[in-house]
Structure formats: C-alpha cells, structure tokens
Amino acid sequence: MEKRQAEIKRDTFETQIEMYLELDGEGKSEIETGVGFFDHMLTLFTKHGLLNLKLKAKGDLYVDSHHLVEDVGIVLGKCINSALGDKKGIKRYGTSYVPMDESLELVSMDISGRPFLVFEGEFSTEKLGAFETEMVEEFFRAVAFNAGITLHAKVLYGKNTHHMIEGLFKALGRALSEAVQIDPRIKGVMSTKGCLFL
C-alpha cells in the first residue's frame, strides 16, 4: 500500500505553518507552535491516533492564540484530506469515548465529504497557559471543514478543564485512526453514491 501522507505549507500575514502528516504511523510527533498547552494536545492527538506529525508553526501570539490555533486546524484538515486521496477502502466512520479522570469525552466522525461540526463542551477556565479554551471548538471546526468530515465532539461530564480538553483531543485521534483504517472487504468507497468528495 502506498504511504498515505501529505505535506502542506501555509503562509499568511498572521501565521506561518509547515506540516507533514502520515496517517499510518506509530504516534511520533515533532511539534512546535509556541503555545505549550496546544503542543501538548497535538502530541496526545498524534500518539493516540497512531499518526506521525511534524509541525512548525509561528503566529501573532502578541494578539492571542486564535489565528495560530485555527490555522493549524485548517492545515491539519487539508493534510488529512490530501493523505486520504480517493478514500477507497477506508472504514469512513470512527467513534471514541475517552475517560480522563473525572471527565468523559466522546468524538464521533464520518469522513463523508460533507463538512459539519456539532460541538458540546463548556469550560470554566478561560485560559490554560497561553491557550484560550474557547479555541478548542474553533480548532475542531477548522479540522472538520477542511478535511470534509462530519464531526461530533462532546464533553459528557467533567470538572477539570485540562482533563476535558485532553479527553477531546485523545478521542479525536482515536476516532480518526478508526475511520481511516483500510478494510479489505470494502470495494471502492463506503458509499452507495460511489464517491466521498469534499
């Protein structure tokens, strides 16, 4: 099987991003965004999704983390879509529940070519280090809409903001890993339409 990989560079007045993604990896990552908590979450996403991810990102952090986090989500979504190619043989659907101490998170996805996000989660802490917690939803939206994924992400319950966000990123990785798996029983794409286009 050909290596399912993608490399994308995005350069704007607000951010400069270089990303390399392998879908069939071992959970290896080299991540530098300048936002420690975000680096931690992306490392968890990569490890639990059994992906390989190299990322160098710089942004206008003197403003806040918004542009950087959203643009990394955009590039990640585009890398996922590119690495999947024609999507032949993929399972298409993936769902993961992840407990993180007192919290429980759910992520379920359909690599349908129809971008959509349902996000349910409220965080009592506004910032974790330099990371604005409201950016979790924006990141998930950017990934979903640029990868062509119908994505549902939900904090079922929890108290600790760090735990809740960590559970979401781990669940995102695990759900993605399931959805992109090749099933030899699937001939063509898993769709009666015969295509899974973005």
Image (spheres, rainbow, N blue to C red):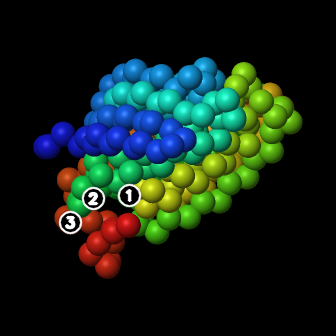
Q: Which mark is residue 92?
A: 1
- Seen in the picture, residue 77 relative to 174 is either above or below; the reply is below
- The residue lying at 40 percent from left, 23 percent from top is 29
Neighbor class of circle 2 (other Cα within 10 Å; few <14, some 14-19, many 20+) is: many
- Indicate the amino acid at tag 1: Arg
Neighbor class of circle 1 (other Cα within 10 Å; few <14, some 14-19, many 20+) is: many
156 and 74: which one is in front? 74
* x, y percent for residue 98: 61, 35
Identity of the residue furthest to the left in this view: 1
- The residue lying at 18 percent from left, 39 percent from top is 3
Separation (CA) of disc 1 from disc 3: 12 Å
* Picture quadrant of residue 20: top left
Element at badge 3? loop
Q: Which mark is residue 188?
A: 3
- Indicate the amino acid at tag 3: Gly
Q: Is residue 185 left or right of residue 101?
A: left
Residue 131 showing in the rendered view:
yes
- Indicate the amino acid at tag 2: Lys
Q: Is residue 128 left or right of residue 57?
A: right
Element at badge 2? loop
- Seen in the picture, residue 96 relative to 197 is either above or below; the reply is above
Residue occupied by mark 2: 87
Q: Are marks 2 and 1 in contact (CB under 8 Å)?
A: yes
Nearest to N terminus: mark 2 or mark 1: 2
Element at badge 1? loop
